[in-house]
Image (cartoon, rainbow, N blue to C red):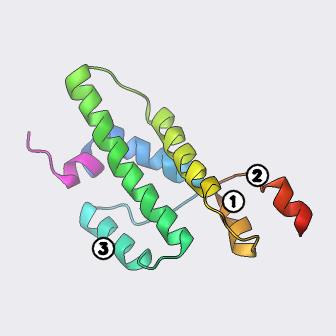
Amino acid sequence: MLETHEHLFFLYPFATAYIMEVKRLVRFHWPYSNWATVVQWASRRWRDKHVVNALFRALLASLVYHVWQERNCRVFQHTSRTPLDIARRTVNDICDLIISKELPPTVSSRGLYRLWQIPWPVEESARL
């Protein structure tokens, strides 16, 4: 079978379930109909250097990486993980990336923490 972006991300049952779990965990919606639409939409929407855009680009890269990694595990090692397990790992990776950034204590930074369900750092709250 010829594997294409379309096949891996829209016809491969694991990928569809995994991406739906990530979207559910972060309460994020995007046009998930075909590969070309996703890439075009993301490249228009997340083009500048704002931290939120950088994080969503990292999320998209993480989605691609984990789908490919799981595909390889299933094909070559005959092992598999559940879509929810990998979705949680993906969300944790992005949360770790957010925490590693030194974000200013602004309303948008707090909103970002809230969106990703990360507790706001106590020491920052105490200074405000």
Mark toward the start of the polypeptide (2 vs 3): 3
- Residue beneath disc 2: 119
At 69% across and 59% down in the image, what residue appears?
113
Q: Is residue 105 magenta?
A: no
Residue annotated with mark 1: 113
* Whether label 1 touches label 2, CB < 8 Å: yes
The amino acid type found where label 3 is placed reads Gln
Foreground mark, 1 or 3, reads 1
Mark 1 neighbour density, 10 Å: few (under 14) some (14–19) many (20 or more): some
Q: Secondary structure at mark 1?
A: helix
Question: Percent x, y for residue 26?
Answer: 58, 54
Kind of element beneath mark 3: helix
Going by the numbered disc 1, the residue's amino acid type is Tyr
Q: Say which mark, if any, is on residue 40.
A: 3
- Estimate the x, y position of residue 71 in percent, counting from the top left: 27, 35
Residue 103: x and y, percent?
67, 67
Q: CA distance from mark 2 to mark 3?
A: 33 Å
In the displayed structure image, the side of residue 120 where residue 77 appears, left or right: left
Highlighted magenta segment, given as a residue range: 1-9
**First-in-chain label (1 vs 3):** 3
Residue projecting furthest to the left: 1
Q: Quadrant of the N terminus?
A: top left
Q: Residue drawn at (46%, 37%), measured in percent from left and top?
A: 86
